[in-house]
Image (cartoon, grey):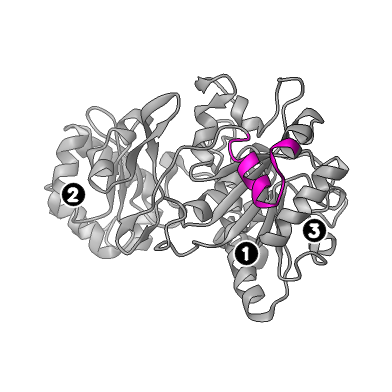
Amino acid sequence: MSDSPSLPLAGYRILSVEQYGAGPYGTLFLAQLGAEVIKIEPPARDGVGGGDTARAVGPHFLRKGESLYFQTFNYNKKSLTLDLGTDEGQEIFRKLAATAHVVANNARGDIPGKLGLTYEALKDVNPALVCVHLSAYGRDNPRAKWPGYDYLMQAEAGFLSLTGEPDSPPARFGLSMVDFMTGTMMSVGLLAALLDAERSGRGRDVDVDLLSAAVHQTSYPAIWYMNEGDITTRVARSAHPSVTPSQLFRTKNGWIFVMAQLPKFWTILCERIGHAELAADPRFVTPADRLANRDTLTEVLDEILSTRPTRHWLDLLEGHMPVAAVNSLDEALDNPFLRETGMIQTVDHPDRKGLKVLTSPIKVDGRRLPVQAAPLLGENTESLLKELGYDDAACARLKSDGVI
């Protein structure tokens, strides 16, 4: 269970005004580490809509409004429906904030101030409260009101220009990696501020935005350009910009990714594929030689590796040097290694027993973190309100008024 006392964040309460991907991905880690993460979701209107927009993202659903997409980001959480645009909704939220350690959100940059999600707005009810904001462009600049999504950040931060073959159109990541990176960074900032709040008794605001996170991930190519004017560009075969062979090669039935990042791996590669003479070839002796003759080396290795299927070369190279098959998504997820290591588990949802899920990559005390199905919309609303002192009649009235 997510509230197991053996988990490192057991006993911490996080209120999260979150939707879609980036924010929920970040708080997912905290929920699986034992924190009580309460999703604040808008209530349905006349029985229609409501909740995190991710609940309605297709194409696969467990029930109307309960998508498999939503499950991905919301294991181990609780759901409370609350209209923060109403006075009573604000009153309830502030009572909850008084019991919490963190208030998080991934709203547009101008929204937290309007909805009272900032430290300035909440410090009077909880001076130690940490308020965390994940937005597209930040809260303190001319773009604060701009909507923004992962793909836009990949485009603006240069990711698309670095991805794909040199003569092909710019290409994005196949997954929403900026959302995932930013959500993870949000959790790092949140936990650091939480540690300080426990020491000092004073909370604060923590901000992270998609574009800053994306630009930060340009890392060493950014330093190369800013200091040396060196513009990293796309290289054929998804190759490393300065090390070779470290790229895709053709096999008889597909592709293989070989990474001779260190000189010793080049020697091992040559020996294990049965062509030790390549290590002494004057065109390929040093890393600089191999880089200068990358195209020729690609042709040579293609000719050798294309004579046998991928599995043959993996059997020779796995465990001896960095190498991997280029799997399709189904091949990647059917990999028995994932089950051996516990990365794939099952949970029971009201609509489907034995729902297969990916668990956390984090282990604690050598064990994978627990997984529970994501909550139904408003599943925990009444129990949380009763904890605050609201009785059945009050809950019924709030529901009738559209507050919950």
The kind of secondary structure element at disc 3 is loop
Reading the image, the residue beneath label 2 is: 317
Q: Is residue 387 magenta?
A: yes
Residue 227 lies in the magenta-colored region: no
- Residue 224 in the image: above or below residue 379: below
Mark 2 element type: helix
The answer to which of marks 2 and 3 sits earlier in the sequence is 3
Which residue is tagged 1?
Answer: 189
Mark 2 vs mark 3: in front: 3
Residue at the spot x=39%, y=41% of the render? 358
Check disc 1 and report its element: helix, strand or loop: helix
Direction from residue 210 to residue 64 in the image, left or right: left
Instruction: Using the image as rendered, state which of residue 337 and residue 56 is in the foreground.
Output: 56
In the displayed structure, 85 sits above or below 199; it is above
Q: Mark 3 points at which residue?
A: 118
The three-letter amino acid code for the residue at tag 2 is Leu
Image quadrant where one finds the C terminus: top right
Q: At 39% across and 45% down in the image, what residue appears?
A: 359
Q: Which amino acid does label 1 sit on?
A: Gly
Q: Can residue 80 be seen in this view?
A: yes
Q: Residue at x 29, y 61 (%)?
A: 366
The image shows a total of numbered marks equal to: 3
Would residue 158 be seen by someone viewing this image from the given angle?
no
Query: Magenta residues, as a range?
Result: 378-393
Q: How far apart are marks 1 and 2 (CA)?
A: 40 Å
Q: Quadrant of residue 351?
A: top left
Residue under the point 78% across and 33% down? 397
CB atoms at circles 3 and 1 under 8 Å apart? no
Camera-side residue: 212 or 29?
Answer: 29
Is the residue marked by circle 1 packed among few (<14), some (14-19), or many (20+) residues within 10 Å? some
